[in-house]
Amino acid sequence: MTLKYACKQSLPVMAGYIVLGLGFGVLLEAKGYGPIWALLMSLFIYAGSMQYVAIDLITSGASLITTALMTLMVNARHLFYGLSMIDRYRNTQPYKPYLIFGLTDETYSLVCSGEVPEGIDQNKYYFFVTLLDQIYWIIGSVLGGLLGSVFTFNTTGIDFAMTALFLVVFTQQWLDTKNHISAIIGVFCSILCRWLFGPDQFLIPTMISITFLLTIFRKRLESEETHD
C-alpha cells in the first residue's frame, strides 16, 4: 500500500527524470563515455544538474579543487534543504543514510508536499519515494547512453525539462494544500533576488531569504496546518 502510494505520488518526477536522464546519457555518450558510466554516475553521484556539469569537468580535465568548488556552488541549496529536513528525518532509521544521500529537489518537494495519509507508513513512504526517484533517473540515463551510441540527437533546449518538472511539482503541491504562504514566499524571494543579484548569483540569496522568512512564519504555518 505504501509502495503503491509512493509510485502514484512520484509519477510527475518519473516523467521528468526519464527525459532529463536521457539527455544526460546522450551527452555523456557524445563525450566518449558509454552507458556503464551513466549507470555508475547515476548510482553513486546522483546529483541531477551536477551530473550535467560533471560531463564538462571530466572532459576538460578539471582539478579536484575546481570540481569541489563547482559542486559546492551547484549544490549549495541542499544545505538549506537539509536544515529543513532535520525534524522530518529524525526517526527514520534504518533508512536515514539513504534518505540523506538521495535528497533531490523533486524528492524534497514530494516529501514536503503534505501529510502522509492514514494507513501509510511515513518512513517507508520517504524511502520508497527517494528510491523510485533514483531508479527513474538511472533508467533514463542508461537509456540515453544506449540511444546515444546508436543515434545522433540535437539536445538543444533539453535542460528546460528540469524547469518544466519544477512547475509541475509546484502546481501539484499548490493544489494539494490549502495554505499557500510557503509557496508565495518562495516565488517572491526568487523574483526579488533574481532582480537584485542577477540570473547567475541569485540562488544562494534566495535560499537564505526563504529560510529566514519560513523561520519567522514557522509557528503560524504549523498552527494553520494543525487546523487544516
Image (tube, rainbow, N blue to C red):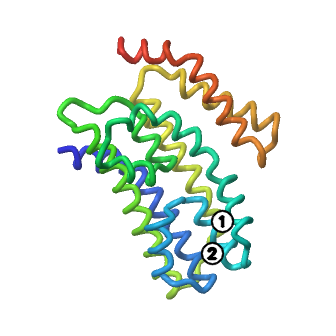
**Residue 51, image x and y in percent?**
58, 65
Q: Write down the residue under mark 2.
A: 154
Q: Is residue 104 left or right of residue 74?
A: left
User: Could you say which is closer to the camera, residue 154 or residue 201?
Assistant: 201
Looking at marks 1 and 2 on the same chain, the residue that comes earlier in the sequence is marked by 1
What residue is rendered at 38% in x and 30% in y? 114
The percent position of residue 142, horizontal first and vertical second, equals 44, 75
- Horizontal side of residue 155 vs 131, given as left or right: right
**Residue 202 position within the rendered picture, expressed as x and y whole percent measured from the top left:** 74, 41
Q: Is residue 213 above or below residue 14?
A: above
Q: Amino acid at mark 2?
A: Asn
The number of numbered discs placed on residues in the rendered structure image is 2
| Residue pointed to by mark 1 | 53
Residue 4, relative to residue 211: is it above or below?
A: below
Residue drawn at 53 percent across, 82 percent down: 148
| Location of residue 133 by image quarter | bottom left
Q: Residue at x 46, y 20 (%)?
A: 179
- Indicate whether 51 appears above or below 3: below
Looking at the rendered structure, the kind of residue marked 1 is Val
Q: Secondary structure at mark 1?
A: helix
Query: Which of the labelled discs sits on residue 61, or is there none?
Result: none
Q: Is residue 118 left or right of residue 87?
A: left
> Mark 1 or mark 2: which is in front?
1
Q: What distance separates the C-alpha of mark 1 from that of mark 2?
A: 18 Å
Q: Which corner quadrant holds the N terminus? A: top left
Question: Which element is circle 2 on?
Answer: loop
- Label 1 crowd bin: few (<14), some (14–19), many (20+), radius 10 Å: some
- Identify the image quadrant of the C terminus: top left
Whether residues under marks 1 and 2 lie with C-beta atoms below 8 angstroms apart, the answer is no
Q: Tell me residue 201's x, y (percent).
A: 78, 45
Label 2 Cα neighbours within 10 Å, binned few <14 / some 14-19 / many ≥20: few
188 sits to left or right of 108: right
